[in-house]
Image: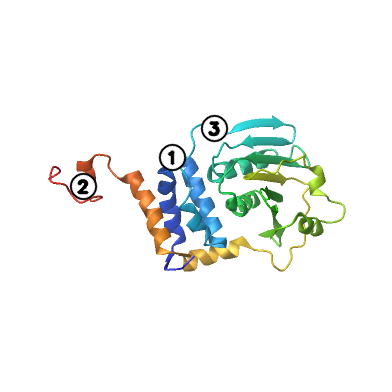
Amino acid sequence: MIQDTTFAYSELTRVLPWSFRALGYKFGTADRAAHLVATAAAMNPALLDEMVHVRMRPAGSPTLTRAPGFLTMDAHGISLLELGPVAVDYLAAHVDDAELNTCIITAVTEVSLIPAVLIAAGTYDMRCVALVTGRGKPTWHYVGHDGGSTVLVSGTSLESLDALMPDQYNIRSKLPPLDDPAGTVVLIAGDAVPLITPPAEAIRPAELISLAHRRGIPVSQATLDALYGLEMLTWAPTSERSRAQAGFTAPSVSAQ
């Protein structure tokens, strides 16, 4: 990402709901997604470049399969913009039902939002681990608390996750057999997720979000223009005459 300017955090959360509305998301979903993306961008500004390439929301709904302690969602190509907050709500609602609750999401897009999804889990005071499988090595992310603040730890091998856990815990042994297609996310939360001592490289999201509020989020001009362009699609009048009168296009001879 080549930084040309900065995006104010508050302006980002104002623009993005309308940008996502233009992609077919309902307003409530788009509003939650905007805050999810703002959190993600505060930790990794380059993620805003990816948001430019989010596709239109597919028609239909995810397929849900429930079992005690498990929820499986076949996303059918729907984004984590929508399903990430839903998964966190499910885990929070059932956190007292069992020592471990698992949500498996398959065929989902925008998996790079997982760290921000976990931060949302942290607001419920949950300890949570996410595994992101796919072609190549899986990655993992952990959210917990240290001294009253949320901490995020990430890694690129399951061996490093095992090393982080106390000896008596084996998170992976508690999971069902998993396939390894692209776009699969596993979220696990509950008392069976231990409280760990965060390593030096742990991220404290609140500090980065506070910094983003003060300084803005670095963004390229091209990405900035694209996000505002999506917002304009939401608000633009539909007829050629109305669009010209609203200033979205140069007036044609027939519109004068």
Contact check, label 3 and label 2, Cβ < 8 Å = no
Q: Which residue is mark 3?
A: 61
> Circle 1 sits in a helix, a strand or a loop, which is it?
loop
Q: Is residue 189 left or right of residue 35?
A: right
Find residue 155 and report its horizontal and vertical position in percent. Answer: 71, 59
Q: Is residue 85 left or right of residue 234?
A: right
Q: Which residue is mark 1?
A: 24
- Mark number displayed over residue 244: 2
Which residue is most to the right?
Answer: 168
Amino acid bearing label 2 = Ala
Disc 1 from disc 2: Cα separation = 24 Å
| Residue 73 drawn above or below residue 191 | above
Find residue 34 and report its horizontal and vertical position in percent. Answer: 48, 50
Disc 3 from disc 2: Cα separation = 37 Å
- First in sequence: mark 1 vs mark 2: 1
Amino acid bearing label 3 = Ser
Nearest to the observer: residue 156 or residue 127: 156
